[in-house]
Image (cartoon, helix red, strand yellow):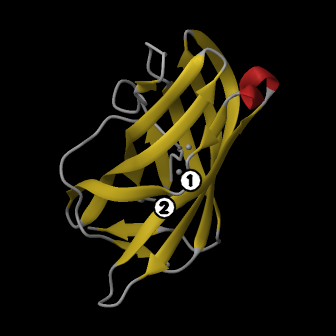
């Protein structure tokens, strides 16, 4: 599972639990954003050159703040498509900021089905909105998703997802 994911995924998706979540404002509010990039995924085997797509939806709340969650994530390219993401929606929380701008997000509730096992949990990703497009960066070990079931190795995602829609840059203020 990149102006908001990790996904997502993406997950989306790189995942070790961080400190307490901060209230945040995701702009534009009540919108769906798409992030895409090339990543490497690993759990016992390494798949390189995977295209990761993550969909993030923000929902406006009363009082001016809002929430965001990754609502879909996928990998494609070669064997990468055999890795699946599940357990949507993945809540996204700001867990780091500097100068009134988010720079770290935690994506929770991620589920991964890999060729060699499963993973479930949270991933910490870097967030950048210093210039358009906004990006989500998965890096090890912070972005590792803990193993689940009989799996013993975490799911690792590394790479950068860039916002591809909407045309308005997504920004996050803690």
Residues 173 and 1: in front is 1
The label shown at residue 14 is: none
Residue placed under numbered mark 2 in the picture: 69
Location of residue 137 in the rendering, given as x and y in whole percent from the top left corner? 46, 41
Q: Quadrant of the N terminus?
A: top right
- Left or right: residue 9 versus residue 100 is right
Say if 65 sits above or below 125 in the image.
below
Residue 64 in view (yes/no): yes
- Residue at disc 2, secondary structure: strand
Q: Residues within 10 Å of mark 1 (few under 14, many from 20)?
A: some
- Left or right: residue 116 versus residue 99 is right
Say if 35 sits above or below 13 in the image.
below
Look at 48% across and 16% down and name the residue there: 150
Look at 67% across and 35% down and name the residue there: 84
Say if 146 sits above or below 17 in the image.
above
**How much space separates mark 2 and mark 1, taking CA atoms?**
8 Å
Please tell me whether mark 2 or mark 1 is closer to you in this view.
1
Location of residue 114 in the rendering, given as x and y in whole percent from the top left corner? 62, 24
Residue placed under numbered mark 1 in the picture: 88
Location of residue 79 in the rendering, given as x and y in whole percent from the top left corner? 77, 21
In the picture, residue 112 is in which quadrant?
top right
The reply to whether discs 2 and 1 touch (Cβ–Cβ < 8 Å) is yes
Look at 49% across and 28% down and name the residue there: 119
Q: Residues within 10 Å of mark 2 (few under 14, many from 20)?
A: many
Say if 9 sits above or below 42 in the image.
below
- Residue at disc 1, secondary structure: loop
Residue 3 in view (yes/no): no
Q: Quadrant of the C terminus?
A: bottom left
Location of residue 90 in the rendering, given as x and y in whole percent from the top left corner? 48, 54
- Left or right: residue 29 versus residue 88 is left
- Left or right: residue 27 versus residue 35 is left
Label located before the other in sequence (2 or 1): 2
């Amino acid at each position: 599972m990149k102006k908001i994911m990790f996904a997502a995924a993406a997950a989306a998706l790189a995942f070790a639990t961080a400190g307490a979540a901060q209230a945040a404002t995701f702009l534009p509010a009540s919108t769906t954003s798409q992030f895409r990039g090339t990543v490497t995924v690993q759990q016992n085997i390494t798949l390189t050159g995977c295209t990761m797509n993550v969909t993030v939806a923000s929902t406006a709340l009363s009082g001016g703040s809002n929430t965001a969650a990754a609502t879909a994530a996928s990998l494609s390219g070669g064997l990468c498509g055999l890795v699946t993401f599940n357990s949507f929606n993945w809540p996204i929380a700001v867990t780091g900021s500097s100068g009134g701008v988010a720079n770290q997000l935690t994506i929770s509730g991620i589920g991964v089905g890999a060729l060699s096992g499963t993973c479930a949990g949270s991933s910490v990703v870097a967030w950048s909105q210093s210039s358009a497009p906004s990006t989500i960066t998965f890096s090890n070990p912070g972005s590792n998703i803990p193993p689940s079931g009989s799996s013993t190795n975490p799911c690792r995602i590394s790479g950068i997802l860039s916002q591809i829609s909407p045309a308005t840059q997504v920004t996050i203020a803690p």
